[in-house]
Image (spheres, rainbow, N blue to C red):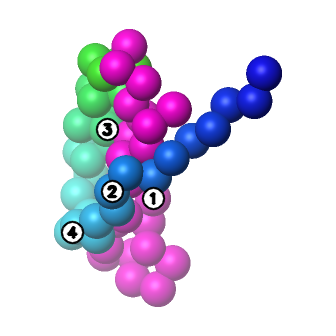
Amino acid sequence: MESKIEILSTVKIQNSPDLYKIVDSLNRTLKHKDLMFGLALDNKDQQQAIFTIYRT
């Protein structure tokens, strides 16, 4: 069985130490809706974070 992950939205936002808490909460709350959330630092600007919403 192959799992396909689809990117629904990506946005750059100002990095904050507590952003991961929001992403963790979203992942725990909405996984039953086949949604997954990701957070990564921008390679070019460490002050920016990239927030991504996926459908699994």
Q: CA distance from mark 1 to mark 2?
A: 14 Å
Report the front residue among 53 and 49.
53
Q: Taken as a whole, is the magenta stretch helix, strand or loop?
A: strand
Q: Secondary structure at mark 4?
A: strand
Q: Which residue is mark 4?
A: 14
Q: Earlier in the sequence, mark 2 or mark 3?
A: 2
Q: Earlier in the sequence, mark 1 or mark 2?
A: 2
51 relative position to 6: left or right: left
Report the front residue among 49 and 51.
51
Report the front residue among 32 and 37.
32
Q: Which residue is mark 1?
A: 40
Instruction: Look at the numbered discs 3 and 1 and tell me whether their residues touch, using CB distance below 8 Å.
Output: no
Amino acid type of the residue that numbered disc 2 sits on in the rendered structure: Ser
Residue range in magenta is: 32-56
Amino acid type of the residue that numbered disc 1 sits on in the rendered structure: Ala
Circle 2 crowding by C-alpha within 10 Å: few under 14, some 14–19, many from 20: few
Q: Which residue is mark 3?
A: 23
Q: Residue furthest top?
A: 32
Closest to the camera, between mark 1 and mark 2, is 2
Circle 1 crowding by C-alpha within 10 Å: few under 14, some 14–19, many from 20: some
Residue 34 rendering spot, x and y as whole percentages: 42, 24
Amino acid type of the residue that numbered disc 4 sits on in the rendered structure: Gln
Give the answer, above or below, for where 29 lies relative to 51: above
Instruction: Look at the numbered discs 4 and 1 and tell me whether their residues touch, using CB distance below 8 Å.
Output: no
Residue 48 rendering spot, x and y as whole percentages: 31, 73
Q: CA distance from mark 2 to mark 3?
A: 14 Å
Q: CA distance from mark 4 to mark 1?
A: 11 Å
Q: Which residue is mark 2?
A: 9
Give the answer, above or below, for where 30 lies relative to 14: above
Closest to the camera, between mark 2 and mark 3, is 2
Amino acid type of the residue that numbered disc 3 sits on in the rendered structure: Val
